[in-house]
Image (cartoon, rainbow, N blue to C red):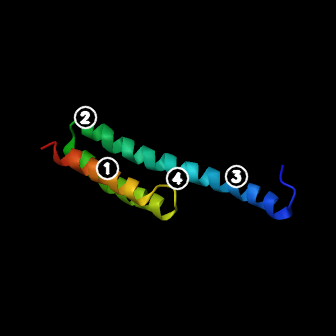
Amino acid sequence: MAQHKSAKKRIRRNARRTVVNSARRSRIRTFITKVELAIAGGKKDEAAAALKAAQPEIQRGVTKGVVLKNTASRKISRLNARIKAMS
């Protein structure tokens, strides 16, 4: 258990950030799932619209440090390629 005042504060801070970060990560996953479901359903227009909505959310995750830059870039790229391959 932490003894110093600063260490105790860091534990409290980490707990708060963990909740926020996990919520953001979950939100990103939800957006990605919506795109994947549209792709699986063969609905190209719906998939493109879902990707357009998901992209800023994924990029926001990068800005907030929840997702690595290259990971986000790769996810967006692969989803986009799957949508393009539908036609």
- Name the secondary structure under disc 3: helix
Q: Position of residue 41 (x, y in %)?
A: 25, 34
Assign a secondary structure to mark 4.
helix
Q: Which residue is mark 2?
A: 41
Residue labelled with disc 4: 24
Q: Residues within 10 Å of mark 2 (few under 14, many from 20)?
A: few
- Marks 1 and 4, how far apart at CA: 17 Å
Q: Amino acid at mark 1?
A: Ala
- Of marks 2 and 4, the one in the foreground: 4
Secondary structure type for disc 1: helix
Residue 50 circle label: 1
Instruction: Return the x and y of residue 13 as percentages of the image width and height.
Output: 71, 59
Q: Which residue is nearer to you in this view: 17 or 40?
A: 17
Query: Residue 34 vs residue 24: left or right?
Result: left
Question: Sequence-wise, which precedes: disc 1 or disc 2?
Answer: 2
Circle 3 is placed at which residue position? 15
Tell me if label 2 and label 4 are in contact, CB under 8 Å.
no
What residue is rendered at 25% in x and 46% in y?
46
Residue 44 image point, x, y percent: 20, 44
The secondary element bearing badge 2 is classed as loop
Mark 3 or mark 4, which is nearer the start of the sequence? 3
Figure quadrant of the C terminus? top left
**Which one is in front, 75 or 38?**
75
